[in-house]
Image (spheres, rainbow, N blue to C red):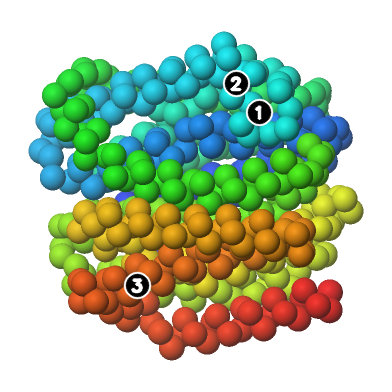
Amino acid sequence: MSRAGNFIRAKFADPVFTFQYYQVFRYLVSILVSVIMVRSGLQKTDLGYYEMWIFIVASLTFFWSAGIKNALLSYYPKSDQKLGNELISTIFWILCGFGLLLGGILYFFPHFIIPLFIKQDILPFTHWIAIYLVLSVPILLVENVLYLNRLSGQLINYTHWSQGSFLLLFLMVAVFDPALINYIYTLLIIAFSRFLYLIWWLYRNGSLVYNSKQAKVFLVFSIPLIFNMLLGSIMDFIDGWFVVRYYEAAYFPVFRYGARELPFSTLLFSSLSAAMIPVLIKDGLDSADVRKRVNRLMHVLFPVSIVGMLVSPILFPWVYSSAFKESAFIFNIYLLILSSRVLMPQTYNFALHQHKIIIWSGIVEIIVNIGLSYWWMKLWGVYGLAFATVVAYFVQKVILICYNFWKNDIPISRYIDIRYYLLYCLLLFVTFFITFNYF
């Protein structure tokens, strides 16, 4: 028991592990929330509206807010403590400003924004969602500043209360009054509480100053990363856009609940990639930490994905309802993305500030995705959209792997064990073939 306790304490003292733990915990809560909403008896059309709102807000904000977040992870380790605190507070005001701008546009001119994403001219409760957009943008700073300051204990506490209260409030709404507006009120309450926590943390750990000179330098540094995240978010946007354009609103949740990779695998690898950027900058590109952590995740996530493929046709109808059986097969296709997600050449490019190759590979990825999505959707419907995404993700990783090998002298073996990788990929694709054809 003592050894187990010491192991757990050591894990939760590791900032990288706690950063990943937060991402996994948040993802699992989002899954449970979607199950709660379906099981609460919320009408499928209202459920579709909710998912469309989340899709629109993410499409409007994710690429630039995540780009700024990644820029912070690269820029902060080079700053001393005082300048670092000023940088964080300056970024807070930058995020607030951009959030207010986009939220104001959505609030006052919804007829110009909404048709860009869906077939409808308007969605219900636009004004509340615009306020949620404003609040949701700055709060992504919380987990990042706690990680950068190596405050593992505070990050764990924040994980539990922020996500736990989110889940509890949604459960209460489902039990007492499962109306769409009440779920939106819950989103606002949680976002506002996290926003207040961020302001309190910034005030306690320095100030809420805005350094205009620092802001200009940082924004220039962030532009390539923002553009790269734009390219990456377009990948997620493409599938959703095709579905909302060619299918009814009530079908959107069926696609969205299936269009997920293995629960928490995306978050684990994306958070690991982000967390390793400061490590590679500090310890050098020869650090064995990336390979060790990637192999550790690979040995867990590939077997879990294979099991997930086998049980998903039974699990989805049982967890949601029989109307979501098609989601299981969409989910199985998205599980194949793990074969490219586990490869992390982009981490070295970010550490070397080689943003140009990331951008160009992202452009190729988008072209492949759009072309294949349109072509394969005509042949296989939403399954074609999912297959196109799998192929497009792999194309970008191949480009970056080749670039790192030829230009940076970084072989793929530096960040993954090739033998296990090929074996796991073979098992994953064989399992997919069996489930897709015989289940």
Task: Find residue 157 and report its horizontal and vertical position in percent.
Answer: 43, 38
Residue at left 17%, top 21%? Answer: 211
> Of 114 and 348, which appears nearest the observer?
114
Task: Find residue 320 and report its horizontal and vertical position in percent.
Answer: 81, 49
> Of 435 and 27, which appears nearest the observer?
435
Which numbered marker is on residue 45? none
Q: What kind of residue is marked 3?
A: Ile
Quadrant housing the C terminus: bottom right
Of mark 3 and mark 2, the one earlier in the sequence is 2
Residue at left 73%, top 50%? Answer: 255
> Which label lies toward us, 1 or 3?
1
The residue most toward the top is 108
Task: Find residue 51 and report its horizontal and vertical position in percent.
Answer: 69, 36
Residue at left 42%, top 67%? Answer: 397
Q: Is residue 14 left or right of residue 351?
A: right
> Of 323 and 242, which appears nearest the observer?
242
Measure how far apart labels 1 and 2 are at the Cα level: 6 Å
In the image, residue 189 above or below residue 85: above
Query: How many other residues sit within 10 Å of disc 1, few (<14), some (14-19) or many (≥20)?
Result: some
Residue at disc 3, secondary structure: helix
Which numbered marker is on residue 115? 1
In the image, residue 378 above or below residue 218: below
Residue at disc 1, secondary structure: helix
Measure how far apart labels 1 and 3 are at the Cα level: 38 Å
Identify the residue position indicated by label 2 in the image.
112
Task: Find residue 45 and report its horizontal and vertical position in percent.
Answer: 82, 33
Q: Write down the quadrant of residue 401 in the picture.
A: bottom left
Query: How many other residues sit within 10 Å of disc 3, few (<14), some (14-19) or many (≥20)?
Result: some
Identify the residue position indicated by label 3 in the image.
401
Pointers 1 and 2 in contact (CB under 8 A)? yes
Q: What kind of residue is marked 2?
A: Phe
Of mark 1 and mark 3, the one earlier in the sequence is 1
